[in-house]
Image (cartoon, rainbow, N blue to C red):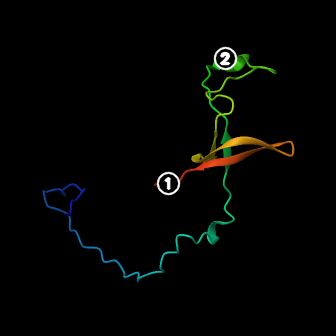
């Protein structure tokens, strides 16, 4: 089905329309194997570990100061979310490794 978005020319006649001929691009290359990630190994990603969230009004945000406690929507010991470029990819538990915080992955998510 072909439709024309142009209006009829003055006098009520349709403008001339010619078919477009596209060159043959050939078969191209076969797609890479699904497990072949070598091309992506050096791509930078942003990983975020989210302890929880809270919604505040501006007035409440302005009242915050040193020593203020912000209550989050998760209880202590609850799994944390692991996001890559904003997408949830895993959940885990907070651990301490040589005086640094880390996350032990307890659940991985796969895109369906």
Q: Name the element at disc 2.
A: helix
> How much space separates mark 2 and mark 1, taking CA atoms?
38 Å
Q: Residue at x 62, y 22 (%)?
A: 56
Q: Which residue is drawn at 72% across and 16% down?
A: 63
Residue beneath disc 2: 60
The quadrant the C terminus occupies is bottom left
Q: Name the element at disc 1.
A: loop
Q: Badge 1: how crowded within 10 Å, few (<14), some, or many (20+)?
A: few
Residue 103 is situated, as x and y percent measured from the top left of the image, at 72, 45
Residue 49 is situated, as x and y percent measured from the top left of the image, at 68, 42
Query: Are discs 2 and 1 less than 8 Å apart at CB?
Result: no
Mark positioned earlier in the residue sequence (2 or 1): 2
**Left of 90 or right of it: where is 112?**
left
Of residue 78 and residue 61, the one placed in the foreground of this image is: 78
Q: Residue at x 63, y 66 (%)?
A: 40
Residue beneath disc 1: 111
Residue 92 is situated, as x and y percent measured from the top left of the image, at 65, 44
**Left of 12 or right of it: where is 32?**
right
Of residue 62 and residue 45, the one placed in the foreground of this image is: 45
């Amino acid at each position: 089905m072909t439709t024309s978005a142009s209006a009829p020319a003055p006098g009520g006649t349709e403008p001339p329309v010619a078919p477009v001929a596209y060159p043959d691009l050939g078969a191209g290359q076969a797609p890479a194997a699904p497990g072949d990630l070598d091309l992506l190994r050096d791509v930078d990603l942003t990983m975020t570990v989210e302890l929880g969230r809270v919604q505040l009004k501006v007035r409440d945000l302005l009242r915050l100061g040193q020593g203020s406690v912000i209550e989050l929507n998760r209880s202590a010991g609850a799994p944390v979310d692991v996001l890559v470029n904003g997408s949830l990819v895993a959940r885990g538990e907070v651990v301490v490794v040589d005086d640094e915080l880390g996350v032990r992955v307890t659940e991985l998510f796969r895109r369906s």
